[in-house]
């Protein structure tokens, strides 16, 4: 399997036959695109849960204070 | 049949079933994406004309192909919203639009980075494929803008549904632009495993893996965003409050 690798050195791999800028830019854009669209919804979920928790405890405190007297 | 349809439209049912399915979808997506990227970067033999730039096309073809799925999806979801007023369909449509804009943008950027070295130009205004894809990008941005511009959620859902149905015309134009007009952008090469075809079997296998990976990514990302939407819109219901309490 290793002999099927198209590059004989690490340097050759980074050079990409002289198209280093174009090839690596595309993979960088793709990486950012995938990461952002996976992480944003995950972070947003945490924010929503936190906000809903805060609201629930707030509402609970309100009903408790009504019942007290 | 109608029972199944009503069930499918229930946000709670969708949330619970996606909780079960997500770990599998995410694992499959990660494996396919890692395999596809390693295959493309290390093992794809250089093309006799394009050298190592075919590594760009593996990504470009996968993202571009998936980007065409957005308007049909939003049109189907929009029709369901208009006819049956199903809550879930509108939640999917709402979150599909910004993700579709991302897909269209990445398609344009990766295509440009390939064209700049293979065609000698970053952009060509006379090419129908390029211009119609740019139009799809702006059309998706306008769906996002329309959604936030109309305050009444029912009215904005209806307006976005209509625009999505009209937007499908553009998908047909993108798809057939390379056949209807004589353009710079090459038509898609037929999937072939023979060594004489324009793209050899190695290219198609690496691209096939990448197409599957990108489709899974599209499903996973849209599902995650839709689940957030469900939590917010259904926050008053008992079952969401239960999820909030236990998490």
Image (cartoon, coloured by chain):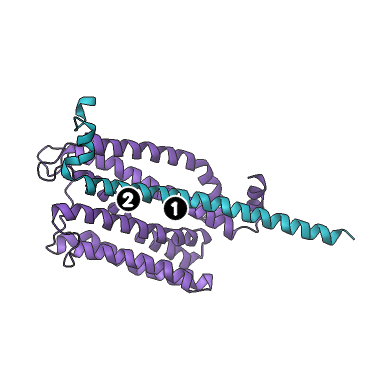
Chain colours: A cyan, B purple
Kindly indicate the quadrant of the structure image that contains residue B41.
top left
Kindly indicate the quadrant of the structure image that contains residue B80.
bottom left
Q: Residue A35, percent across and down?
A: 41, 47
Between the residue at mark 2 and the residue at mark 1, the CA separation in whole angstroms equals: 19 Å
Residue at the spot x=55%, y=51% of the render? Answer: A45
Q: Answer above or below: position of B77 versus B37.
A: below
Left or right: B197 as drawn, with respect to B39: left
Left or right: B126 as drawn, with respect to B101: left
Q: Answer above or below: position of B55 versus A68.
A: above
Residue at the spot x=40%, y=57% of the render? Answer: B99
Q: Is residue B158 visible?
A: yes
Q: Answer above or below: position of A60 versus B35.
A: below
Q: Residue A14, percent across and down?
A: 23, 39
Q: Which residue is mark 1?
A: B222
Residue density around tag 1, few if under 14, some if 14–19, many if 20 or more, within 10 Å: many
* Residue B189 - label: none
Name the subunit of mark 2. Answer: A
Q: Quadrant of the C terminus of chain B?
A: top right
Residue furthest out toward the front: A11
Residue furthest out toward the right: A69
Q: Which residue is mark 2?
A: A29
Q: Answer above or below: position of B205 versus A42.
A: above
Query: Depth check: B136 or B90 in front?
Result: B136
Name the subunit of mark 1. Answer: B
Q: Residue B128, percent across and down?
A: 19, 65
Query: Depth check: B208 or A35 in front?
Result: A35
Q: Are marks 2 and 1 on the same chain?
A: no
């Amino acid at each position: 399997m290793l002999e099927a690798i198209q590059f004989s050195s690490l340097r050759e791999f980074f050079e990409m036959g002289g198209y280093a800028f174009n090839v690596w830019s595309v993979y960088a854009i793709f990486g950012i695109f995938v990461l952002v669209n996976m992480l944003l919804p995950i972070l947003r979920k945490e924010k929503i849960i936190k906000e809903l928790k805060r609201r629930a405890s707030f509402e609970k405190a309100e009903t408790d204070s009504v019942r007290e007297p | 049949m109608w029972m199944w349809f009503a069930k499918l439209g229930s946000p709670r049912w969708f949330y619970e079933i996606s909780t079960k399915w997500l770990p599998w979808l995410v694992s499959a997506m990660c494996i396919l994406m890692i395999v596809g990227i390693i295959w493309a970067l290390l093992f794809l033999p250089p093309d006799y004309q394009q050298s190592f730039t075919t590594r760009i096309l593996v990504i470009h073809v996968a993202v571009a192909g998936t980007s065409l799925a957005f308007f049909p999806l939003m049109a189907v979801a929009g029709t369901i919203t208009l006819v049956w007023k199903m809550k879930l369909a509108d939640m999917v449509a709402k979150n599909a639009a910004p993700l579709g804009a991302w897909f269209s943008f990445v398609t344009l950027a990766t295509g440009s980075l390939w064209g700049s070295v293979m065609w000698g130009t970053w952009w060509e205004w006379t090419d129908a494929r390029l211009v119609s894809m740019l139009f799809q990008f702006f059309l998706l941005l306008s769906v996002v803008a329309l959604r936030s511009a109309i305050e009444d959620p029912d009215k904005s859902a209806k307006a976005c549904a209509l625009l999505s149905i009209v937007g499908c015309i553009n998908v047909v134009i993108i798809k057939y632009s390379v056949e209807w007009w004589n353009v710079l952008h090459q038509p898609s090469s037929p999937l072939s495993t023979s060594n004489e075809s324009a793209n050899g079997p190695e290219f198609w296998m690496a691209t096939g893996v990448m197409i599957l990976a990108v489709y899974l990514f599209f499903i996973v990302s849209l599902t995650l965003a839709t689940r957030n939407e469900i939590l917010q819109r259904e926050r008053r219901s008992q079952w969401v409050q239960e999820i909030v309490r236990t998490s």
